[in-house]
Amino acid sequence: MPEDTVTVIDNRTGRQIELPVRTATMGPDAVDIGRFFRELGYFTYDPGFLSTASCHSKLTYLDGKQGMLMYRGYPIEQLAEHSSFIEVAHLMLYGELPKRQQLEDFNSIITHHSMLNEALKSFFRGFYHDAHPMAIMVGVVGSLSAFYHDSTDISNPVHREIAAHRLIAKMPSIAAASYKHSIGEPQVYPDNSLSYVGNLLHMMFSVPCEKFEADPVAEKALDLIFILHIDHEQNASTSTVRLAGSSGANPFACIASGIAALWGPAHGGANEAVLSMLEKIGDVKNIPAYLARAKDRDDPFRLMGFGHRVYKNYDPRARIIREMCHEVLAKLGNENDPLFELALKLEEIALSDDYFIERKLYPNVDFYSGLIYKALGIPTNMFTVMFSIARTVGWVAQWMEMISEKNQRIGRPRQLYVGETRRDYVPIDQR
């Protein structure tokens, strides 16, 4: 059977070429333009790569129009209802849901890799006392390659697996230590008797002089948020990890690059922006005025946490997290906190107002996750850090998939040059 092709005709020269079509199991097929420049002499121009498939992947599929998100073919709704973060992490790394013994073994490996090298303590002390936790995360994660030389040979599958385990296991420890440094409290060692999320809460909120026990609702909510944030196809930070990895960089450096990209307010900082917006609105009585501003095209004000660049329907993650958000606020939310009242009123309006419904401006996952983090006592400068802990699983899985590809090449995007044409140097006294 002949391969499907797309015919491209150059109206300038009359030349034409047949480009093969790569078939997807779900979603749009892709035209392979590998021969386009070689045979026609043109680059393709696609700012932001919004119409370009940069790789093939078996990990995550999303359909923005249908409001669909799947990990390894499993709908996010099913995983969120029945699975745990560690179980989904195994799924992402190995391609299948684990059997009971496999899950126990994997959980044990992650648990026993959670400690940090003692020398890293001095690394944290080197940061200024009010350093942003994300700045610390970028530095410390990137430095791990200086401590774990036995897992930096990217050509060795065993090294890759060990590095993946270490990154997933140590990220909560690094995050908690970053937080402790920012508030001047001593670092807390991990406790191997606790769950992945329970251990994070323990390391963040316990102190050596008092006994600490995480609230089950808090632990359940954070585990759910982490599942929802594990991966989201070829977003900015994931693409950054893949691009860095294509050069042969060690896995710790690659993940550090992903953290840096995630730090951007247009990517991982959206849930922090939700809280800032609520603080700006200030009171329920001010909502009508701000809604009027949001509907005014000439006003730059936008409702943060509503709508999504990819999802043109209800964000499936928002449907899942909404119920948990209400459960957390009922159990842990401060009744006297006006932000929660504001948020719930905005949610009510967005789900009933024709303006929002027609434009599909529904509350998204960032709207609810920010509220949950605040109710759990997590400060806003740690919101993106929480995101990075969960997304590490996706980054690592994407990196491992890319490295194992037979035709893997270093990333090298091209450009449409619009600068000066050739000109000669003029001596300084003649300018």
Image (cartoon, helix red, strand yellow):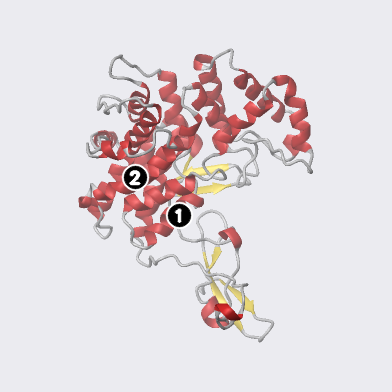
- Find residue 151 and report its horizontal and vertical position in percent: 24, 51
Determine the CA span between mark 2 and mark 1. Answer: 15 Å
* Residue at the image point whose x is 50% and y is 15% from the top: 331
- Tell me where residue 136 sits by quadrant: top left
- Relative to 362, does residue 231 appear above or below in the rendering? below
- Whether residue 110 sits left or right of residue 415 in the image: it is left
Q: Residue placed farthest to the front in the image?
A: 429
What amino acid is labelled 2 in the image? Answer: Val
Residue visible at 61% across and 44% down?
311
Q: Which residue is mark 2?
A: 141
Residue 58 location in percent, x, y? 43, 53
Q: Quadrant of the C terminus?
A: bottom right
Whether residue 105 is situated above or below residue 419 in the rendered picture: above
Category of crowding for the residue at label 1, using alpha-carbon neighbours closer than 10 angstroms: few (below 14), some (14–19), many (at least 20): many
Residue farthest toward the left in the current orientation of the protein: 150
Q: Position of residue 394 (x, y in %)?
A: 41, 46
Say if residue 355 shows up in the picture: no
Sequence order check, earlier mark of 2 and 1:
2
Classify mark 2: helix, strand or loop: helix
313 vs 393, left or right, is: right
Q: Amino acid at mark 1?
A: Thr
Residue 240 has which mark? 1
Going 65% across and 39% down the picture, which residue do you hit? 307
